[in-house]
Image (cartoon, grey):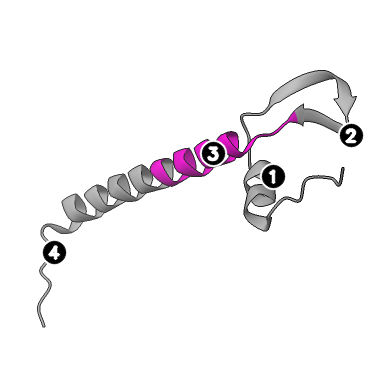
């Protein structure tokens, strides 16, 4: 049987997985076993964290400079 072909998206998600579990004996030279779900969770938590930090920075800017008025 031919090896299972993987798409670029699934390979990208597996490479970004920071929650992968370490495994004892190495598997194909990998010290951990990354998954697609782990990659999705990594990207989701990173975006949530960056959004929270951006909100906190915007609150500091608004408090420091009073109110922001946007006019056309």
Range shown magenta = 33-48
Residue 15 bears which disc, if any? Answer: 1
Q: How many labels does the image show?
A: 4
Looking at the rendered image, the quarter that the C terminus falls into is: bottom left
The disc, 2 or 4, on the residue closer to the chain's N-terminal end is: 2
Quadrant of res 18: top right
The disc, 2 or 1, on the residue closer to the chain's N-terminal end is: 1
Q: x%, y% of residue 51?
A: 36, 48
Q: Main secondary structure of the magenta part?
A: helix
Q: Nearer the viewer, mark 2 or mark 4?
A: 2
Q: Which of marks 3 and 2 is in front?
A: 2
Q: Residues within 10 Å of mark 2 (few under 14, many from 20)?
A: few
Reading the image, the residue beneath label 4 is 68
Q: x%, y% of residue 61?
A: 25, 55
**How far is disc 2 from disc 1 in space, using C-alphas?**
14 Å
Left or right, 45 with respect to 72, comes to right
- Farthest bottom residue? 72
Q: Which of marks 4 and 1 is in front?
A: 1
**How far is disc 4 from disc 1 in space, using C-alphas?**
41 Å
Residue 61 bears which disc, if any? Answer: none
Reading the image, the residue beneath label 3 is 42
The disc, 3 or 2, on the residue closer to the chain's N-terminal end is: 2
Q: x%, y% of residue 42?
A: 54, 38
Left or right, 17 with respect to 22, comes to left
Q: Is mark 3 on a helix, strand or loop?
A: helix
Q: Residues within 10 Å of mark 4 (few under 14, many from 20)?
A: few
Q: x%, y% of residue 68?
A: 13, 64
Q: What element carries label 2?
A: loop
Q: Residues within 10 Å of mark 1 (few under 14, many from 20)?
A: some
Looking at the rendered image, the quarter that the N terminus falls into is: top right
Residue visible at 79% across and 20% down? Answer: 23
**How far is disc 3 from disc 1 in space, using C-alphas?**
10 Å
């Amino acid at each position: 049987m031919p090896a299972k072909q993987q798409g670029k998206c699934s390979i990208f998600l597996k490479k970004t997985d920071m929650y992968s579990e370490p495994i004892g004996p190495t598997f194909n030279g990998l010290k951990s076993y990354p998954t697609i779900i782990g990659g999705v969770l990594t990207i989701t938590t990173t975006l949530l964290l960056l959004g929270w930090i951006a909100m906190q920075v915007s609150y500091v800017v608004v408090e420091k400079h009073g109110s922001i008025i946007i006019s056309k």
